[in-house]
Amino acid sequence: MPRTRRLWAGGGAPAQLATPPPEATRTVTPDPTAAAFFDVDNTMMRGASIYWFARGLAARKYLSAGDLIRFGWRQVRFRWAAENPGDIDVTKQAALAFIEGWRVEDMERLAEEIFDELMAERIWSGSRALAQLHLNAGQRVWLVTAAPVELGRVIAQRLGLTGAIGTVAEVRDGYYTGHLDGDLMHGTAKVDAITKLAAVEGLDLGRCAAYSDSINDLPMLSTVGHPVAVNPDSALRREARRNGWEVRDFRTGQRAVKIGVPTALAAGAAVGAFAAVVALRRRRKRPDRLSRRDLARLRKRDGDRTPAASERGR
């Protein structure tokens, strides 16, 4: 049967940050009903976490050059599809297709390895320091990301945060089916998730803080009492100024000048360049995984009428 899984997952013990950067200092008072919610991509870390995860998979020959090109294009479309429901629907269908048939334990192991190799050095020290201020005040800190919840959990654990809210993939008998279990953690879905979490954890969203770089997270920022725009895109910067919200920009030099450059578009270009290199290497290998035929048999056994991935789009 499909495994029921939560949108959120616990992190690890709080890690102390010795001296917060001056630009990250702010007053956070102890409050058991308050918490902080941090977006991940370009807020807690430079770039898109799922892109760096895919790049780590490619380095291990788990993805081909074609996989990377398609993956990069989907990320570009997702980044700029907030106002186009049709594009979001297409992205939702393909969001986790690349892990179809993978074992959950492989995904978790690879997420830990790739974070340590490629993501740890890309964590914004200023954003990490802001999270630590909330932890030091006894508040809980959650990551809220469109990336798979397993990846979000690893990042939260490595940073010593409370936990992560992320996109949940459907699992059958320990293997990913390639389908979503619920909605993509994006836009208003983040609001629904933190609202449910607040009810479980006894939080007052009016006393909570939220941090994000993207106008796509305007619903989440508008839901809490203390919204903060971090490394904001131009649309969010305008919205923050209009509403009198706090703005923190940890980018320096060219990063600050290029505030209007579509980050996901740049990532997509990087995917294409990297894929050209990967194409010259030997054919990929994959972790142990079920075939689409095996997954279809699991669905038939469980009485699931959802068409298999190979049948969709015919």
Image (cartoon, helix red, strand yellow):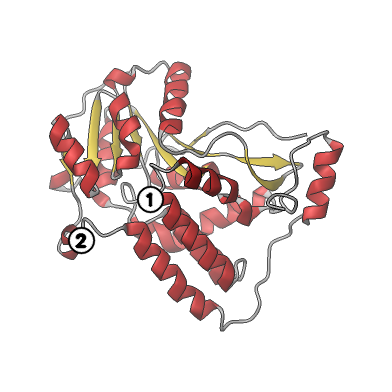
Secondary structure under badge 2?
A: loop
Q: Position of residue 146 (x, y in %)?
A: 46, 43
Provide the residue designation for mark 1.
80
Identify the residue at horizontal 58%, vertical 82% (top origin): 281
The disc, 2 or 1, on the residue closer to the chain's N-terminal end is 1
Q: Position of residue 58 (x, y in %)?
A: 55, 68
Identify the residue at horizontal 47%, vertical 54% (top origin): 50
Residue 15 shows in the view: yes
What's the amino acid at mark 1?
A: Trp
Residue 138 drawn above or below residue 164: above
What's the amino acid at mark 2?
A: Lys
CA distance separating discs 2 and 1:
17 Å
Which mark, by number, is residue 269?
none
| 92 with respect to 247 (left or right) | right
| 164 with respect to 29 (left or right) | right
- Looking at the picture, tell me which residue is in the foreground, 20 or 163: 163
Q: How many marks?
A: 2
